[in-house]
Amino acid sequence: MERHTPTHDNPWLALRNLTPARIALGRSGISLPTGAQLDFQFAHAQARDAVHLAFDHASLRSQLSERGRDSLLLHSAASDRDQYLQRPDLGRRLNQESVQQLRDHAQANPGGVDLAIVVADGLSALAVHRHTLPLLARFEEQAAADGWSSAPVVLVEQGRVAVADEVGELLGARMTVMLIGERPGLSSPDSLGLYFTYGPKVGLTDAYRNCISNVRLEGLSYGMAAHRLLYLMREACRRQLSGVNLKDEAEVHNLDTENSSSKSGNFLLGEE
């Protein structure tokens, strides 16, 4: 007699090889199979751990120093992680000690800089720990070739995206780049986001920023993220703006564009 297992495979099972999304999980009766349910709980635990993981800024500063990069350690107005999660507004501003620290640095180094790089834990310090240094290695090499001056790398504990505006304004920076841990997904607890702003100042909205998301080994590569960021910076300097009025039309080299005469660029923008 033929024996049947209690678990029924989904006919779309082959599609799981093409995406990390949770599809074609099968079923056991009217419920998920035990394996799929355990995988979901594990991914959920990883996401929660990423949100609450402490920012290891000491290790990051040490590694930056080994690469010859100075850094400044600041703190947002959120006193601890609980307050940071409950009061997003406090994560967007620096505390008074950090404000004074930046004022002192700017006074000792007058004239401003082209670029301020800000690194904040955000909602995934894990992403910052894993991807900040490899990305900076790609980006800063090309930025130096363009001749841009930069401030010491600014590390902000309990920081959100908009805190980079205050950092840039206090340092007299023409542009800021924020590297921050993104909100973890159930298959991506270590996704790093980049936020670029031209003419940073307190009070700007997200409409004045450009975002490059999902920088990680399984997502957007370090090289591609650096390439897109540099394109945005060059165009921002030329047009003196950033945000919704600055579109990412960076040329992407791949086998199709290199071996054909078709136009390159962002296919979503269409042809003019």
Image (cartoon, grey):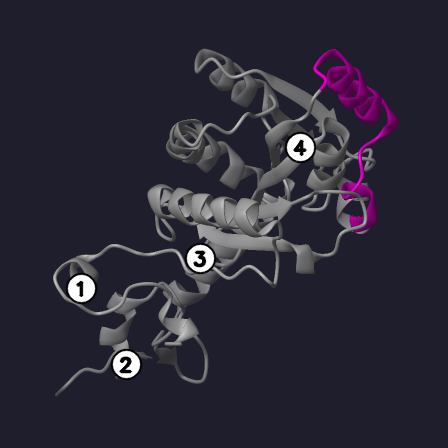
Q: Could you tell me which secondary element the residue under label 4 belongs to? A: strand
Query: For the point 44% across and 43% down, which residue is it?
Result: 230
Q: Is residue 107 left or right of residue 176?
A: right
The quarter in which the C terminus is drawn is: bottom left
Q: Is residue 89 magenta?
A: yes
Q: Amino acid at mark 2?
A: Trp
Q: Could you tell me which secondary element the residue under label 1 belongs to? A: helix
Q: Which mark is residue 173?
A: 4
**Chain-order first, disc 2 or disc 3:** 2
Q: Is residue 191 visible?
A: no
Q: Nearer the viewer, mark 3 or mark 1?
A: 1
Residue 56 drawn at (x, y percent): 58, 26
**Chain-order first, disc 4 or disc 1:** 4
**Residue 198 falls in image quadrant:** top right
**Chain-order first, disc 4 or disc 3:** 4
Number of numbered labels in the structure image: 4
